[in-house]
Image (cartoon, rainbow, N blue to C red):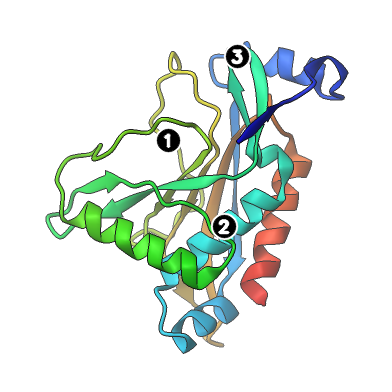
Amino acid sequence: MKTLLDLENWNRKEHFAHFKQMEEPFFGVTVEIDCTKAYQTAKSINSSFFIFYLHKTLVAVNAIENFRYRISENEIYINDQIDASATIGREDGTFGFSLIEYHPDFKTFEQIALTEIERIQNTSGLFTRSFDNDNLIHFSAIPWINFSSITHARSFTYPDSCPKISFGKMMVNETGKKTMSMAVYVHHGLMDGIHVGQFIDTFQELMNQ
């Protein structure tokens, strides 16, 4: 479900009008995430760390209202729920785009994710199902690279307002602290740095629990 935003009375009406005209309305940041506690927690419950931090990402995304905004025909809609289209790798070195529905309960979400990952890994090609809605984040893990910045392949003519969140290689320092790079790219017509900061802080808090 989604609700139409009252654009005329929105305090960012002028910001939206300004940034939506740009050829590249997205901006992004890359930050270091402490994943020491989260990795320990995932392993203690015999869960995939990838699925664990994907779930925490979606919890944080759904908690920050601006991350649930999407643009359609010059209007902004507020989605009740945001799911994930995550890139899932295969043994032959290719990947496919998944659709992993969000659920606030981790164990329920884990089963949803495992089922979709298995489906992708037993198919071929990039698009293996239809994507009827844009209540998504575009999610990717690049566990081979400890990146400090990242760019995305995008068609500027395609109407896209979905946030793009990517994670890099886990690094471990001499004290045992584990960290990963996280890149967050968002449409500037829908949010500003303050909202990205709120998302990052919320996500880190969830990872520390």
Residue in view at x 60 percent, y 22 percent: 71
What residue is disc 1 on? 152
Element type at marker 3? loop
The percent coordinates of residue 133 (x first, y second) are 47, 31
Label 2 vs label 3: CA separation? 28 Å
Q: What is the quadrant of residue 59 in the picture?
A: bottom right
What residue is disc 3 on? 22
Q: What is the quadrant of residue 96 in the picture?
A: top left
Rendered view: 134 above or below 23: below
- Residues at marks 2 and 3 touching, judged by CB atoms closer than 8 Å: no
Instruction: Specify whether 199 is left or right of 102.
Output: right
Question: Mark 2, mark 3: which one is toward the viewer?
Answer: 2
Residue in view at x 70 percent, y 52 percent: 63
Give the amino acid at mark 1.
His
Residue in view at x 72 percent, y 14 percent: 18
- Residues at marks 1 and 2 touching, judged by CB atoms closer than 8 Å: no
Question: Mark 1, mark 2: which one is toward the viewer?
Answer: 2
Instruction: Specify whether 115 is left or right of 180.
Output: left
Element type at marker 1? loop
Please state which of residues 43 and 183 is positioned toward the viewer in this rendering: 43
What residue is disc 2 on? 57
Please state which of residues 126 and 164 is positioned toward the viewer in this rendering: 126
